[in-house]
Amino acid sequence: MDNFYRGPATLLTGAAEVPVDAALFTEATDADSTWFGTIRPEGSQPLWTELEGDTARLRLIDGREGRIAIRGSGFGPVEVSGEGPLPAPRP
């Protein structure tokens, strides 16, 4: 298992699906690990306008979805944390 992922993802909150660039990492080696990172919207729209609370889901490019806790939001990167395996490396 790789311990770092950087690439496209989709933030899912309510009815909104927002394309984002994700940078996620974990220090654990098992599949049921906690991971952390940041997401940044593609384009110039700030993410806080799309967020409806402090939790959402993140869909990775390999189709896996994970529940994330939003640690901070605003006009720059949004800090998140989640549980489970990081996605497989991109081909």
Image: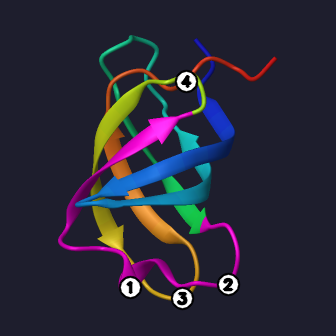
Kindly report which numbered mark, 1 or 3, lies closer to the viewer in this rendering. Answer: 1
Outermost residue, right side: 91
The secondary element bearing badge 3 is classed as loop
- Mark 4–mark 1 Cα distance, whole angstroms, equals 27 Å
Which of the marked residues, 4 or 3, is nearer the chain's N terminus? 3
- Please name the amino acid that badge 3 sits on: Phe
- Mark 2–mark 4 Cα distance, whole angstroms, equals 26 Å
Kindly report which numbered mark, 2 or 4, lies closer to the viewer in this rendering. Answer: 2
Q: Residue at x 45, y 86 (%)?
A: 74
- Mark 4–mark 3 Cα distance, whole angstroms, equals 26 Å
Q: Quadrant of the N terminus?
A: top right
- The residue to which callout 1 is attached is 49
The residue range painted magenta reads 41-60
Which of the marked residues, 2 or 4, is nearer the chain's N terminus? 2
The secondary element bearing badge 4 is classed as loop
- Please name the amino acid that badge 4 sits on: Pro
Relative placement, left or right, of 27 versus 5 is left
CA neighbours of label 3 inside 10 A, class few (<14), some (14 to 19), many (20+): few
Which of the marked residues, 2 or 3, is nearer the chain's N terminus? 2
CA neighbours of label 1 inside 10 A, class few (<14), some (14 to 19), many (20+): few
Placement of 42 over or under 64, stated as above or below: below
Q: Are marks 1 and 3 in contact (CB under 8 Å)?
A: no
Q: Is residue 62 magenta?
A: no
- The residue to which callout 4 is attached is 87
Mark seen at residue 75 = 3
- Mark 2–mark 3 Cα distance, whole angstroms, equals 8 Å
- The residue to which callout 2 is attached is 44
